[in-house]
Amino acid sequence: MNDFIVAILRSGTPLIYVTMAGMIAQRAGIWHLGLEGVMIIGACATVIGIVLTGSFVAAILIACVLCFLASILLWFIIEKLKANPIIAGLGLTGLGIGGTALAAQSIFGSQASVTAPFGVPRLGPAFGSYSSISIFVVAMPFVVLALWVLLKRTRFGLQLAASGEHPFAARSVGINPARMRFIALAVGGVLCAIGGAELSAGSLQIFAQNMTAGRGFMAFAAVVFGAAHPIGSALAALFFSVVGALGIRAQIVFGDAVPHDLLLALPYLATIVGVWISGRLRGGAKTANGFAELRDY
C-alpha cells in the first residue's frame, strides 16, 4: 500500500504544480495551453543544468529563469501583439517540445536521453517507505494551501479574479489587468519549472525528448475539471494520477490479459471523462471574459 501511495505522489506532484500554473492563468483570464511547453523546458533545463553545473540549486534556478522567460514571451504575444491566447499557447508548446530536443542534441551531440548524476534532494532512509520522496513532493500540499489563501483570502486574489472575470470593470477601479496577467503567468512559469524538475529529476534523473507526454494538457483539463479552484484543481490532477497508478498496477496484476495500450491510455481517458462531467455539471464550458478582452481590445 505504501508503494502505491508513493507512486501516486511521484506521478501526481509534477501534474499538480503545472495545474496550479494553469489555474492561476485561468483566474487572470488566460486559457493556458502552453503548459506542456513550459513544463518540458523546466524538465530539460533541470537535468542539463545538473549535468553542466553539478549543482541542483543552480539547475533549478536556470529552469525557473527559462520558464519565466517563456511565460513572459507568451504574455507579450497575447497582451502586446494581441494574438489569440489559445493559438499562442499551442505555439509555445511546440516551441518547448522542439526547442528542448534541439538544445539537448546541440549540447550533447546526440538525440539519446540525458542522464543526471543526481536529482532533487529526497527525504532519506529515516522516513522508511517514503525515503525516495523528494522535497518538492513534501512541499506540494503547502504550495496548494498557500495558493488557496492567496487567491481566496487576499486583496491580490480578488484583483486577479476581477481581472479575469470582469476586466473592464477592474480597469475602471484602477486595477491593471495586463499587469495581473503578467504576474499570473510569471508565477505559473516558476510552478511549471518545479513541476518539470520533479518529473525529470524527482525520481528518474533523466531527460528524454517529449517526456511530458501530454501532462500539460492533462493539467489544463484538471483546471477545467476543478473549476479553476486551487484545491478542486489539485484534487482533479490527483485523480488523474490515481487512475494512471492504477493502470500501472493493473499491468502487474493482469499481465497480458488486458491490452497494454489500453492501460497506458487510462489517464487520458479519465481526462476526457473528467472534462465531460465538468461540462455537464456546469452547463458547458464558458469562455472567460478576460479572453474576450484580449480578443477584442
Image: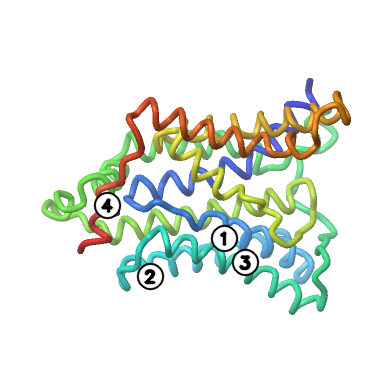
**Mark 3 burial class by Cα count in 10 Å: few <14, some 14-19, many 20+:** some
Q: What residue is pinned by disc 4?
A: 290
> Disc 3 versus disc 1: distance between alpha carbons?
16 Å
Question: Residue pushed farthest top?
Answer: 1
Q: What residue is pinned by disc 1?
A: 37
Could you tell whether 251 is left or right of 180 in the image? right
The residue positioned 79% from the left and 20% from the top of the image is 1
| Pair 3/1: label in front | 1
**Badge number at residue 62:** 3
Element type at marker 1? helix
The answer to whether 210 is drawn above or below residue 247 in the figure is below
**Residue type beneath disc 3:** Ile
**Residue type beneath disc 2:** Ile
> Disc 3 versus disc 2: distance between alpha carbons?
23 Å
What percent of the width, then of the height, locates residue 218?
56, 43
**Residue type beneath disc 1:** Gly
- Disc 2 or 4, which lies upstream in sequence? 2
Element type at marker 4? helix
- Disc 3 or 2, which lies upstream in sequence? 3
Observer-nearest of 29 and 125? 29
> Disc 4 versus disc 3: distance between alpha carbons?
31 Å
Element type at marker 3? helix
Q: Quadrant of residue 238?
A: top right
Element type at marker 2? helix
**Mark 2 burial class by Cα count in 10 Å: few <14, some 14-19, many 20+:** some
Callout 4 touching callout 3 (CB < 8 Å)? no
